[in-house]
């Protein structure tokens, strides 16, 4: 059996046993009843609906927000990364400044800033378009991740040997052509593990969107606790912790496997 598969299985089994032990230690003889209560709330926690009739909130909302935020950050981060390696100081200076500003901004502060800075609706061609809390949360998460992706892009490009640039110049390629056709294709395998780690970090950070009023899993958890009583709070939050672990742990294992493959190729 592959070593990474073993680590995955041991990790899942180990964390599961630890959380079960903690659950039993907290609830004792009432563990079975509490477990049934939480199981009955699973559709609501996962999809935001009581019967999986719609996926408009809950854990599904965290996944959707993280994917959209990563997509936005990937586009903006690549553009910012290109600016950071520009030969023009007029472009490189502001790009580095923006990267450092975003990278060192607390995610929670950025989320609150987007909540109050962005309007609730905008008028485009005579039509009013609502900017929902989910959209604000997505933009708020995408901004600091943009800085991380820009730094990953810069590091990936600079890891490609300079001889590649010189050879391409000798063939008559311009700088952007070299970057697009020669350097970036070689840098992508190097950048991929770091991008996956960035996404895992982003997904964990998606739990912060509860402050924007988004109907995410933590918002649903508050509703469940208010409805069922404070005695289920520990069980609900342990369950949410387990959901985040099951989503992020495979990404961590795959990232480690890709890193090893990149080292072997080098």
Image (cartoon, rainbow, N blue to C red):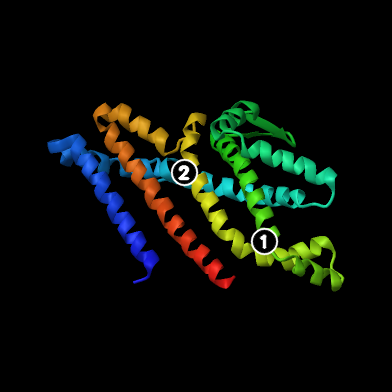
Q: Nearer the viewer, residue 181 or 121?
A: 181
Q: Which residue is mark 2?
A: 204
In the picture shown, does residue 158 fall above or below 232?
below
In the picture shown, does residue 22 fall above or below 13?
above
**Could you tell whether 226 is left or right of 253 in the image?**
left
Disc on res. 159 = 1
- Where in the figure is residue 171, as x and y percent of width and height? 85, 74
- Where in the figure is residue 181, as x and y percent of width and height? 74, 67
- Where in the figure is residue 131, as x and y percent of width and height? 61, 34
Q: Earlier in the sequence, mark 2 or mark 1?
A: 1
Disc 1 on helix, strand or loop?
A: helix
**Could you tell whether 33 is left or right of 139 in the image?**
left
Disc on res. 90 = none
Residue drawn at the location 61% of the way across and 28% of the way down: 113
Residue 50 in sight here: no
- Where in the figure is residue 258, as x and y percent of width and height? 51, 64
Write down the quadrant of residue 194 in the picture.
bottom right
Do residues under tags 2 and 1 come within 8 Å of each other at their CB atoms? no
Disc 2 on helix, strand or loop?
A: helix
Quadrant (top left, top right, bottom left, bottom right) of the N terminus: bottom left
Residue drawn at the location 83% of the way across and 52% of the way down: 87
Q: Nearer the viewer, residue 133 or 177?
A: 177
Write down the quadrant of residue 6 in the picture.
bottom left
Hey, which residue is sitting farthest bottom in the picture? Answer: 171
Residue drawn at the location 61% of the way across and 46% of the way down: 148
Choose mark 2 or mark 1, whichever is in front. 1
Badge 1 density bin: few <14, some 14–19, many ≥20, Cα 10 Å? some
Residue drawn at the location 31% of the way across and 30% of the way down: 225
Quadrant (top left, top right, bottom left, bottom right) of the C terminus: bottom right
In the picture shown, does residue 214 fall above or below 39?
above
Q: Nearer the viewer, residue 266 or 209?
A: 266
CA distance separating discs 2 and 1 = 28 Å
């Amino acid at each position: 059996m592959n070593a990474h598969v073993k680590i995955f299985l041991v990790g899942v089994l180990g964390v599961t046993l630890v959380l079960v032990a903690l659950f039993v230690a907290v609830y004792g003889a009432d563990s079975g009843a509490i477990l049934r209560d939480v199981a009955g709330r699973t559709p609501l926690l996962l999809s935001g609906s009581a019967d999986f009739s719609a996926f408009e909130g809950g854990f599904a909302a965290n996944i959707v927000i993280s994917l959209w935020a990563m997509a936005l950050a990937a586009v903006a981060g690549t553009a910012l990364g290109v600016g950071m390696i520009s030969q023009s100081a007029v472009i490189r200076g502001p790009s580095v400044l923006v990267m450092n500003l975003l990278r060192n901004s607390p995610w929670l502060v950025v989320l609150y800033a987007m909540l109050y800075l962005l309007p609730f609706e905008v008028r485009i061609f005579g039509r009013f378009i609502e900017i929902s809390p989910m959209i604000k949360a997505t933009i708020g998460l995408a901004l600091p991740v943009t800085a991380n992706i820009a730094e990953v892009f810069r590091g990936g490009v600079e890891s490609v040997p300079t001889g590649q640039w010189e050879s391409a110049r000798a063939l008559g390629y311009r700088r952007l052509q070299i970057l697009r056709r020669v350097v970036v294709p070689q840098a992508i395998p190097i950048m991929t593990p770091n991008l996956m780690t960035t996404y895992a970090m982003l997904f964990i950070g998606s739990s912060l969107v509860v402050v924007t009023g988004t109907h995410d899993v933590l918002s649903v958890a508050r509703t469940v606790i208010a409805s069922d009583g404070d005695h289920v709070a520990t069980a609900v939050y342990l369950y949410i912790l387990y959901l985040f672990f099951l989503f992020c742990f495979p990404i961590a294992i795959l990232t480690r496997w890709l890193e090893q493959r990149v080292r072997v190729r080098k």
